[in-house]
Each structure stands twice: as C-alpha cells, then as structure tokens.
Amino acid sequence: GYYLANTVKTRALIEAATRAGVRHVIFSSTAAVYGEPEVVPVPEDLPLNPINPYGRSKLMSEWMIADAAAAHGFSYVVLRYFNVAGADPAGRSGQSTPDATHLIKVATQAALGRRARLDVYGTDYPTPDGSCLRDYIQVSDLAEAHRVALDHLRGGGESLTLNCGYGRGYSVLEV
C-alpha cells in the first residue's frame, strides 16, 4: 500500500542519495497532508492533519527528508501537489490508464462519446452547485514548479515546503 510505495521507498531513496552525496532533493508530496482544511487558499503553515494512509505516508516521508537533510547537510524542496490534471501540450505524454477514474479524464471521455455518462457522487457539499471543489493544477505548471525548485536549490536557496495549486477550486459540475 501507501506505506510501502511512499514511506519505505522514500527511506531507501534517501539512504542511497546520502551515500551518493546528493546535495539537493525535490520531493513530490500532497495536499492530503492537511486533511480537510477549512481555509482556501491553503497556506503552507496550516496545521498538518492527514486523514488517510496516503496523506500520513507522505507526511512521514516529508519528516524523514527534513531529518536526513539536517543530519547529512543536503537541501530540499517539498512540493505539495493539489489535484494534477492535463497532459503534455504536444500530446507526448499524459494519463494513459484505460480505466482511470480521474474526473477530468472521465469528463473528457464522456464529452467525446467514449463513455456513456459521467456519474457525480456527492451533491450536498457547501458549494454553490453542491458538488465537491478541487484545486486543479496543470501538469505543465507542476513541471515548471520542479524546475524553479531545482534552480532555487542550485542557487544556494534554503530548504522549503511549497503548495502547488492555483488557490482556486472548481466544482465537479464546473469541470
């Protein structure tokens, strides 16, 4: 599960990186470390309260990276992703899982007639249309965030944690 895929493998990566003398680490984390935040946009200093194994496994990984950085003298940037969407604008890559349940892929399939319908689960959220809100970030913007993070570290910048979203949500029905 998540603890093997995230926590255990992150630990192995940290150990290999420190043995190899890696000086900079960029870690892909998740906004799930916040749990169910009551403020939007979500600030990086909001208390961490993951409510599921995925969020907890990523938070444990963040802690391990911070501890290892302090012990071994490397710098890091943790990028906390919100909801990643989209594909390479040139069409070279994107989500290719045939049975994917990601909202944007499913909505696109329905719009193109490749899926009979789009089911909406949950209509009693405290939003204008009653459906769930999500802050989506385009994958190309997320790739750029990684490039900027690496430039920051290579330029001598200090370790930091950043949220990667736009600070605005879109409801399921808007999508």
Image (spheres, rainbow, N blue to C red):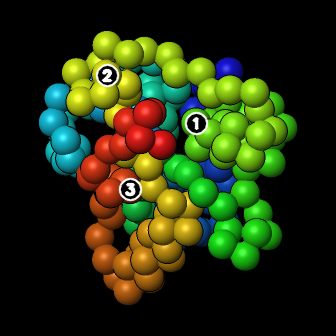
Q: Nearer the viewer, mark 1 or mark 3?
A: 1
* Neighbourhood count class around disc 2 (C-alpha, 10 Å): few under 14, some 14–19, many 20 upward: some
Q: Nearer the viewer, mark 2 or mark 1?
A: 2
Q: Nearer the viewer, mark 2 or mark 3?
A: 2
Mark 2 or 3, nearer chain start: 2
Q: Is residue 143 left or right of residue 117?
A: left
| Residue at the image position 48 percent from the left and 68 percent from the top | 141
Quarter-of-image position of residue 12: top right
Q: Nearer the viewer, residue 117 or 5?
A: 117
Numbered label tally? 3
**Would you name the residue on which mark 3 appears?**
164
Look at the numbered disc 2 and give the secondary structure of its residue: loop
Quarter-of-image position of residue 159: bottom left
Height in image: 55 above or below 90? Answer: above
Q: Is residue 111 left or right of residue 143?
A: right
Find the distance from the CA under tag 2 to the CA under tag 3.
25 Å
Q: Tell me if I can see residue 29 in this picture.
A: no
| Residue at the image position 44 percent from the left and 25 percent from the top | 56
Q: Quadrant of the N terminus?
A: top right
**Would you name the residue on which mark 2 appears?**
130
* Amino acid at the residue labelled 2: Gly
Mark 2 or 1, nearer chain start: 1
Mark 1 or 3, nearer chain start: 1
Q: Tell me if I can see residue 130 in this picture.
A: yes
* Neighbourhood count class around disc 1 (C-alpha, 10 Å): few under 14, some 14–19, many 20 upward: some
* Neighbourhood count class around disc 3 (C-alpha, 10 Å): few under 14, some 14–19, many 20 upward: many
**Would you name the residue on which mark 1 appears?**
103
